[in-house]
Structures are given as structure tokens and as C-alpha cells.
């Protein structure tokens, strides 16, 4: 494996998966006694968590306020 002229290197997929390094994961490097360590910074965000965050608030509809899930499903299905 080589470092590119821009200082980039590809982390092998197997290592990314084992370490939970998903796209957009913030990482930091540490240099200690001749060894470089890469680690994720802050809380880990799973793909599922990112999907939920993208959808958060998208289901807000004033007509649904105060209704149960069953009542909302009835409205969505067009049942009376």
C-alpha cells in the first residue's frame, strides 16, 4: 500500500468494517513512539442512525397531532 502524492491512503474494506469506519466518520491520527494510530472521534454513527436522523421530522403533520399510531395508519390507508 502506498501513500499518494496528496497524502491519501485507502483503508482496506475488511479493516473499515471491523473498526466500524463508515463514510463520513470523523477520525484522528496520533503519533506515539514511532507508531501512527487512527481512531474514530466522538460518538459512532451507524448507517441506521444516520437514516433515522435524515428522516427525523419528515413525518410531522398537524393532522396527526395527538393521534395514536393506529389512528394515523387508518388515515393513511383511507379507512373510515
Image (cartoon, rainbow, N blue to C red):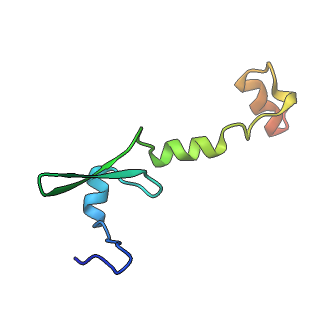
| For residue 5, above or below residue 80 | below
Provide residue 75's location: percent of width, then percent of height.
83, 33
Residue under the image location 12 percent in, 57 percent down: 34
Provide residue 43's location: percent of width, then percent of height.
42, 38
User: Viewer-proximal residue, 35 or 77?
Assistant: 35
User: Viewer-proximal residue, 65 or 24?
Assistant: 24
Residue 12, picture quadrant = bottom left
In the rendered image, the residue lying farthest to the bottom is 5
Provide residue 16's location: percent of width, then percent of height.
31, 58
User: Viewer-proximal residue, 2 or 80?
Assistant: 2
Q: What is the tally of numbered marks visible in this picture?
A: 0
Residue under the image location 78 percent in, 34 percent down: 60
Residue under the image location 58 percent in, 41 percent down: 52
Whether residue 8 sits left or right of residue 66 in the image: it is left
Residue under the image location 28 percent in, 51 percent down: 19
Name the quarter where the N terminus is drawn: bottom left
Residue 65, picture quadrant = top right
Name the quarter where the C terminus is drawn: top right
Whether residue 32 sits left or right of residue 75 in the image: it is left
In the rendered image, the residue lying farthest to the top is 66
Whether residue 42 sits left or right of residue 62 in the image: it is left
Amino acid at each position: 500500500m502506498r501513500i499518494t502524492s496528496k497524502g491519501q491512503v485507502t483503508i482496506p474494506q475488511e479493516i473499515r468494517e471491523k473498526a466500524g469506519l463508515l463514510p463520513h466518520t470523523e477520525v484522528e491520527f496520533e503519533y506515539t513512539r514511532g507508531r501512527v494510530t487512527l481512531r474514530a472521534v466522538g460518538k459512532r454513527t451507524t448507517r441506521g442512525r444516520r437514516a433515522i436522523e435524515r428522516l427525523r421530522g419528515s413525518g410531522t403533520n398537524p393532522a396527526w397531532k395527538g393521534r395514536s399510531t393506529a389512528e394515523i395508519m387508518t388515515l393513511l390507508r383511507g379507512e373510515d
